[in-house]
Amino acid sequence: MIILEEPFVSDFILGYIFKNNIPVLKNNYAFSHNKGYKLNYISTDQAIKNYNRGERIYTVSEHTFDWIYKNLPGSGIVEKISIFKDKARFRTLVSELYPDLYFKEISFEELKNFDSSNVPYPVILKPSVGFLSLGVYALFNQSDFNNALSDLIETTKNKIRLFPESVIGSKFILEKYIQGDEFAIDAYFDTNGTPVILNILKHVFSSVSDVSDRMYYTNKEIISRYIEPFTEFLARINSKLNVTDFPVHVEIRISNDGSIVPIEVNPLRFAGASCTDIAYYAYGINTVDCYLNQIKPDFNNILGNMPDKIYSLILIDKNGKDIDNAKFDYHRLQGDFENILSLRKIDNPAMGLFAVLFTETSFGNEAELDKVLIADYSGYVIE
């Protein structure tokens, strides 16, 4: 069973749902955003029955959590969601594995009067329950802390109101800033709790203070180098959590001493806004199908047939500006990249995006990707 909700669902996922006649919870979003596909809608009562008889649930968005909390209270799925969604709780559960990792949970009101002079900088400040890097700051000194607090009060708090409480929450955490390479992993824990990795994406930034989600990429070398250590990492984490039959989107960093440290784990979904589809363009697999049918990709075979290219997921954002997407020059993007595999125009203002791109780049042409990290795409608006 799949639950569709804001902010976005791709034609790729809709086509898969339609072709395989997968049950879809009938809600306003699923009914009004089916893009012409005749989906197999089921009622709330039927969805509850399906879950209770063991049917797996996948969602494209954490906006669905309100429905789950209301209709499946006290269930195993609610418990699994809460383990990961509450970042402070997750940190506590795995703290034995990371005894030196500083973190502190604090309410928004407490944050206003918090004594930041004794904070062991550098740290990350972010919502305890978060989404799309809203209210996330890299802080290197007390001045950074004060500036972040000012920005939260004046700007970010308004953005947070665009999302349900179950997605954002009103508490924040301060945690140690882990310096090193960052990766995103789409995976699921099977019926025995064994992790199965479906996607590994390197998350790149323009600077050490950049916390944006602008670009991720994957290639043969990334998969072959990291799939074993990342699988072992997920198994080690799950030794403390004991989660089974559950999909996750995991963000980690490899510290300077080689340790793999979790940043956060997003429950019941893979990369948001259907961005997990990059696995299809890069590896030829459907991550949602893999989870629902407990398929473990044969990456040895996949890598043997995979082109030696760079596959990128790029968010064409508005730099926080309020711009009408209808005025954006999407055609201009075509000239910026060697090969755009998919260009998805975004019409949801809450996402702050013009488009999501999936691209293929030859080695030696990485300059086109470097430009993405510093580009101001608000300049692509047609006056």
Image (cartoon, rainbow, N blue to C red):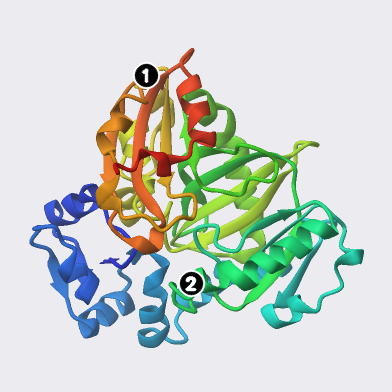
- Mark drawn on residue 307: 1
Q: Nearer the viewer, residue 139 or 228?
A: 139
| Tag 2: amino acid | Val
Is 181 rendered above or below residue 304? Answer: below
Crowd tier of the residue under label 1, counting other residues whose Cα lies within 10 Å: few below 14, some 14–19, many 20 or above:
some
Along the polypeptide, which appears first: circle 1 or circle 2?
Answer: 2
Residue 55 shows up from this direction:
yes
| Tag 1: amino acid | Pro
Identify which residue is drawn at 43% across, 87% down.
Answer: 73
Q: Nearer the viewer, residue 162 or 377?
A: 377
- Mark drawn on residue 316: none
Is 326 rendered above or below residue 57? Answer: above
Q: Secondary structure at mark 1?
A: loop
Q: Which residue is mark 2?
A: 167
Q: Is residue 162 left or right of residue 287?
A: right
Give the image location of residue 40, x and y in percent.
Answer: 12, 66
